[in-house]
Structure formats: C-alpha cells, structure tokens
Amino acid sequence: MRLSRVATASIAIVTIAVVGALAAVMSGIGGTAVAGGTTEVAQASAQGHESIVQSFLDSYTGGTVPLDAAKGAVREFTLEVHGITAEIAPGVEVEQWAFAFPGEQPSVPGPEIRVQQGDLVRITLDNRHSQPHTLHFHGIISVAQMNDGVPHITHQVMPGETYTYEFVAMNPGTHAYHCHVDTFTHHDFGMYGVLIIESADERVVWDREYTLVLDEWDSRQTSTNPVHEREYDYFLINGQAFPAVPNLEILEDEVALLRFVNMGYEPHAMHLHGSNFLVTHKDGYPLAAPYKADTLLVSPGERYHVLLKGRDGSFPLHDHMLQFVLNAGIYPGGMHLMIDGGVERNAQGAVVEVGSHTAHGAPLQVADDELPLLGDTEMNIVDFAFEMPVIRVRAGSTVTWTNLDGAPHTVTAGTPTDAPGSRAFDSTGMAEGRMAMMMQGDSWSYTFDEPGEYEYFCLPHTNMVARVIVE
C-alpha cells in the first residue's frame, strides 16, 4: 500500500535528497574555483533543485492514513476543558480557558502530549466548559478531515459532550493542538498545547530538553467583557511573563534541546546572550543544512528545534523585538528568562565567588539566625541569598538592603501571589506602575513603623525568603 510504504521512508528520502543537492552545489563551487566559470555551479544547482522537487513529489506529504496502518502502540489521552483564573505575572490574574488531563490542574499551555512515530493516537475531548470547543492538530498531516477540528467543516463539541479524535502519528517533530472554534478568541484565552511525535531513528545528542511556548496576552479580556481590539500588554513564555518565567538550567558543557513553539499572533526574535545555538529543525522537519545563530525569528504557528551548549555564568534569552519584553509597558518583563550555566568566571577566567549561583536561594548558614533588638539596620544580598534570614528591630527603625550579588534582586513583602497594592513594602514600585530591580551595588531602605512579623522574598528568585520582626 503506497501510504504505508512512503510513511516509513519519506523523511529519510527528503533529507538525503537535500543533503545530496547541497553536496552537488559545493562540488560545483569547488570545480568553478579551478575552471574560473559559473556553468558547473548553475548545472549543479539545477540538478539539486530538480532532485529536491522530485523527492517531494515521490514522498508522502499528507493524506488520510487508515487507522489500521498504525505500526506502534495505541496511545490514549483525555483532555478536559475548564475555565480558570491564573497568574501570568506577579500580581496579575487573568481568566483562562485551559486544557488538563483528568485529575490535574488546568494550565496554559495545556499538558504536553508525547507519542512515538507509528502510534495510533486517540485523544478524547471532554468539554466541561460553558463554550463549544474542538481539537485541531497543528502540523499533523495524516488525520482524516472528520478529525481535523474545524467546526464549520466537521463538528464542534458542545458543553457536557465528549468526542474522541484518532490519527496515526506519521510525521515526527514538535507540533501543537488547539481549539478551532472562533479561533481568535479561544486561542487568546489559552486553548493550546504541544504535541510531540518522537522518531526512533533520531540520534539523541542532548542532556536536557525544554519546550518554550510563546504567546501574547491582553489582561483586560474576560468572557463577560470581550476585547474586540486586542492590545496585548503581557508577553508569555509557557504562560508566564518575566520575572515569573522560571530559569533554564544548562550546566557548562551540557547540551540542551530547546523547542520553540509560537502559539501567538506576533513574530518573536528570540535572542541568546553569551553563546549561540544550532538550528536543526523547522516545523518538525530536519534541516538539510543546520545553521548557527544567536537570534531566531519564530513566526506564528512555527516550531523550531535548536541545540545549545551550556557555558559558565548566567545569561538572558529574550525577545529582541523589545516591545515584547514589557509588562503593561514596564521594563523588564515579558519574554525574558535566564539560562543558568556553570560558575561565573571573571575576564581572566577565575571563578567569581561573589555573585555565583552556589546558594540558589537557600539562606546562608549562620551561628545565630536572630539578631538582638536593634535600631536602624543594614543587611546584604550575597550568593543568591539574604544574608540574615531574620532581622529583629524596634518600631520606627529603618532597614537597608544592599545587593552585593551579580544578579538583579528585589525586596518584596508577602508571597508571589499577592497583589502589588496589598504588599507592605516592595523595592520594585509595582504598585506605582514601576518595575525597578536592585542591580549589583544598589541599596534600598524601608522604615518599619508598625510592630509585626514581615516575610519578604525576591521576585525573580522566589526561593530567597527572609523575615523582619518589628517590636
């Protein structure tokens, strides 16, 4: 049967053909250098072009694959749909329509679905929401039309109903699923997730892997107050805006696979400081000629694979379209995270003790973690930790914090889920519409007028926690 024959070999055919074409062109270039002409290059280029076109015509590029053609396991999943409220940045809660596996917390993006090439995939959509929904499998080319999830062509799953989608996992790579009912609105409420088809033939050269889903969010939007003219004010990686985006750990000399998935409506130029990455795949397909870059433009709907080697220090990965590294117009925010590598080294290559990541937010060990009752007090931030976990002062005393660390920090009262306006004190000034970070050498002071116990933390590093007791 033609479909099953092509299905097992198509990707290898395309890759070999393209590599062969490039080899032919390179050979032509070498010959031209000797002959001094361009005829050989033109001929090699034409032959390579025809080879690529023919391999495309001969290969499987889409079409319903009968379910009984599956050669792998039967993989069954259930995706529930729920309405939730979630925090996308410190103190910023929004309404979301979210997917979840049964018994798990709904989230945006939805849970990752991972299968093997050749598996028979069954995904049941259990609509527990007030709106009709569907599932569309973005990048999957083997699905029958009835399971493509486009409501005006097929059907939609009404509130309280279920429907099971089935397809054979043919084309490996990073893909996506999302709702296709009133796509613009449902997408903007968070109805999407990542679908990965793994190939047994792919050589795993990485030690870690991370998936980074990019999106934009209008914080004004609710189901009772729809926004007809979108004004995106938060820009998310995996549903969070900086400083809520977790850091990525890629230790020195490790190799990581990063999967970029743009589920938003804007292109994003993801830029890496201090290193470069190797771009290996686009939309699930291996590139015949992987290339190095430090900035990768990911357009809406696109998926890229890149390989990244860890190095010393901690460096940003952020959108270089700088309007997307803001939170409601305040910098820094948005699509920005840190990649934590090995120990920091100075320009001479020596290990830097101050500002290293050795503590990772744990309090320093001290002989006595409670100070005697003091007046005005100064304390430091060193090695990703507040120097003294507990400070005891009299009412009316002023406490000054100084950042001796190499990373930016904040002194923020309460917990990460508190609204900015409810915090007793906050060095960022978020309640006044600012987002100030304490850089190395900066100090910030606060006068405690009221007795009580005050817990505080660092916004970018929420494991950094300490207390002030005012008597």
Image (tube, rainbow, N blue to C red):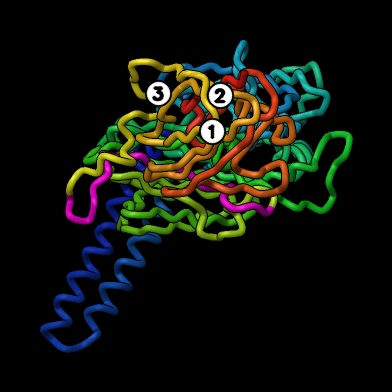
Residue 345: % across, % down: 23, 47
Q: Quadrant of the N terminus?
A: top left
Q: Is residue 141 visible?
A: no
The answer to whether residue 386 is magenta is no
Q: Which residue is mark 2?
A: 393
Above/below status of 204 relative to 216: above
Q: Residue at x 68, y 29 (%)?
A: 449
**Residue ranking furthest to the right:** 224
**First along the sequence among labels 2 and 1:** 1
Left of 91 or right of it: where is 410?
A: left
Which residue type does callout 3 highlight?
Answer: Pro
Disc 1 residue crowd, few under 14, some 14–19, many 20+, Cα 10 Å: some
Q: Nearer the viewer, mark 1 or mark 3?
A: 1
Per the rendered image, the range of residues in magenta is: 329-349
Q: Which residue is mark 3?
A: 363
Q: Which residue is mark 1?
A: 376
What whole-number distance in Å separates the C-alpha atoms at marks 2 and 3?
20 Å
**First along the sequence among labels 2 and 3:** 3
Residue 363: % across, % down: 40, 23
Disc 3 residue crowd, few under 14, some 14–19, many 20+, Cα 10 Å: many
Q: Residue at x 14, y 78 (%)?
A: 31
What secondary structure predominates along the stretch shown in magenta?
Answer: loop
352 or 140: nearer the viewer: 352
Left of 313 or right of it: where is 266?
A: right
Above/below status of 346 relative to 161: below
Residue 188: % across, % down: 72, 41
Tally of marks: 3
